[in-house]
Image (cartoon, rainbow, N blue to C red):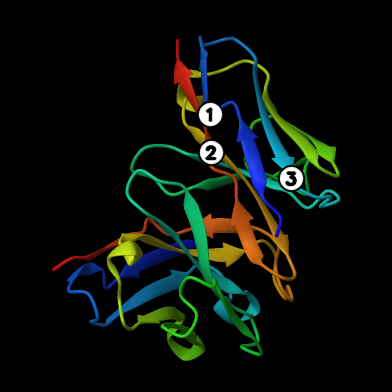
Amino acid sequence: EIVLTQSPATLSLSPGERATLSCRASQSISNSLAWYQQKPGQAPRLLIYDASKRATGIPARFSGSGSGTDFTLTISSLEPEDFAVYYCQQRSDWQGWTFGQGTKVEIK
Amino acid sequence: QVQLVESGGGVVQPGRSLRLSCAASGFTFSNYGMHWVRQAPGKGLEWVAVIWYDESNKYYADSVKGRFTISRDTSKNTLFLQMNSLRVEDTAIYYCARDLGPYQLPGDYFDYWGQGTLVTVSS
């Protein structure tokens, strides 16, 4: 079973700062990883897929990197609307679609 | 524009049934695999079920297998989730979500989500 572990659980930063979120898979998943943003009371929004491709309409300050077991979501300069919870997600043939437990990016 | 609108949630007693619907618009529904994903209050996301775009396959999370059934009515552009033998631990917001890209067998990611419908299982 592939487990996705996100770190840190909470990231306290100020607007304008750089955010670096990590997602580690328990075994190699190549580049088959997505990142989602979820704000309170809203549905998740796809940000990044295939580890580094930005989804339609996603600002360039969001970038993804990594392959194998270690992945990173970077927000180059935090805007006020970026404070939210971020989830990584992958799919495997034997267990379906799974998510990490989430990283909350909060205002410092 | 793509829209997914869930309905059918509510409060139900353990052991009872509920049927959720997701009305799709703004895209060719029959070309896309569709999913249900749920989120317990204050918790993370859990994938529940998928139906392929051509209805050739349906898969379920172990936690709902044998109790939940996913289906779709292409003529009405609607996705369904029939939930039987409900348990307290099924309490969650249920989202429908679309595969990223048409004709995926299966799709890897979810590009559009509905706003969710809350299911509360309580005696």
Q: Alpha-carbon distance for marks 2 and 1?
A: 7 Å
Quadrant of residue A71 in the image?
Answer: top right
The residue carrying mark 2 is A102
Q: Alpha-carbon distance for marks 3 and 1?
A: 16 Å
Inspect this view and state whether residue A58 appears.
Answer: no
Badge count: 3
Q: From what the image shows, is residue A18 above or below residue B48?
A: above
Q: What element carries label 2?
A: loop
- Taking the spot 33% from the left edge, 83% from the top edge, the residue there is B84
Residue A67 or residue B33, whichever sits in front:
A67
Q: Mark 1 or mark 2, which is nearer the start of the sequence?
A: 1
Quadrant of residue B33 in the image?
Answer: bottom right
Residue type for callout 2: Gly
Q: Is mark 1 on a helix, strand or loop?
A: loop
Q: Do the residues labelled 3 and 1 touch (CB within 8 Å)?
A: no
Q: Alpha-carbon distance for marks 2 and 3?
A: 13 Å
Inspect this view and state whether residue B34 appears.
Answer: yes
Residue A21 or residue A94, whichever sits in front:
A94
Residue type for callout 1: Ala
- Taking the spot 69% from the left edge, 71% from the top edge, the residue there is B102
The residue carrying mark 3 is A25
Q: Do the residues labelled 2 and 1 touch (CB within 8 Å)?
A: yes
